[in-house]
Image (tube, rainbow, N blue to C red):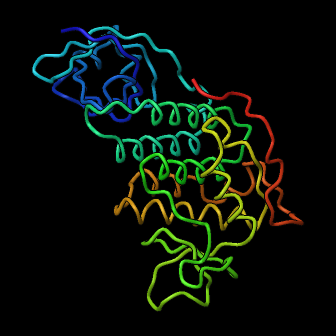
Amino acid sequence: MYINTTGLVLREAPYRESSKILTVLTATHGKITVSARGARRRGSRIAAAAQPLMYSEMTLYNQRDRYTLTEAQPVELFPGLTGDLVRFSLGAYFAELLEAVAYEDVPNPELLAFGLNALYLLGEGQRSVRLIKAVFELRLMLISGYAPNLSACVRCRQAAREPILLLEEGTLSCLRCKRAGEPYAPLCEGSLEAMGFVLSAPPRRAFSFRLEEPALSRFASACEAYALQQLGRRFRTLEYYKQVSQGEEKTSDGIDKNPTSDGLSNKKGNLDHDAL
C-alpha cells in the first residue's frame, strides 16, 4: 500500500552500500522508520530528501508495517541552519528530543508543527539561540505531558519567595521550603514569568518574547535541567552543541551584554513566521 504524507527526517543511518535507514516524524503516522534505498547513490532522486532536518512530501510503500521511501520532494530545507555550525548542532539536538518523545505510529501533528516552527525560527537567525533552545525544551515538556506546576510553592502554598523549580516533582518551591538533597534549578521573577508565558501562550506565540540577563541564563538553565530530568537521559547532540557553542552564546545571539533588568520584555512581539 502506498501512502502520501509529509515528514521531517530526525535521524539517518547508513545501510548496506548505498542506502539509508531514516527516522521520520510524519504528519499522519507519527514517528516511523523508513528504508531509503539508494539514497547514498549519486544521482538518486530521493537523496536530497533523505537528509537530517529535511522536511519533505513523501510517498511511502508500506508492507507489513515496513516503510520504504519511493518518491520525495523537499518542502523546507532550513537553509539558515546549514551554514551555521552552532545553529545546525542545536537543530540536531531538537531532532533528538523530538525522537525521544514521539511514539511509533501515533500521529501527533502538534508535535510536528512545533518542531518545524522551532527549526524555522532557529534558521531565521533573528532570535536568541539560547531563548529558542529553552522555549523548545519547556514547550516540548508541555506537549509531551510533563508540564511543571508553577502556580505556587508546593510546600507552603504561598507565592514562592526565592523561587526554585524542583526537577523531579516538576513543581515550584521557595528556596527555604526545599528538602535536603532535592535536585532543583534556581529561578527569579523574570525567568519564572517567562516559563509561565511559554506554558500558557498559544502554540504560534510561544517564542514571541525577549528576556534579558540574568533572567535569560536562569530560564535557559532551568528548562534544560528540567527536560533532561523528566526524560531521564543524556543527549549526545546536546553535548556536541555545547562544545561548538562555547564562547558564542552571549555574543552571537543578540543578547544585551549590559542588561539593566531581569524581566520579561516585548511579550506581545510578533513572530515573523508562525508554523510551516
The answer to whether 117 is drawn above or below residue 180 in the figure is above
Between 257 and 276, which is closer to the camera in this rendering?
A: 276
Residue 15 % position (x, y): 19, 28
| Above or below: residue 213 compared with residue 33 | below
Q: Residue at x 66, y 72 (%)?
A: 187
Q: Quadrant of the C terminus?
A: top right
Q: Residue lying farthest left?
A: 64
The reply, left or right, for residue 179 in relation to residue 152 is: left
**Measured from the top left, where is residue 65 in percent x and y?**
15, 24
Residue 19 vs residue 219, the one in the foreground: 219
Q: Is residue 242 above or below residue 96?
A: below
Which quadrant holds the N terminus? top left
**In percent of the image, x 62 and y 38: which residue is there?**
122
Dividing the picture into quadrants, the one containing residue 57 is top left
Tell me: residue 33, above or below residue 185: above
The residue lying furthest to the right in this view is 260
Name the residue at 42% across, 72% down.
168
Give me the residue at 44% from left, 57% from top. Answer: 146
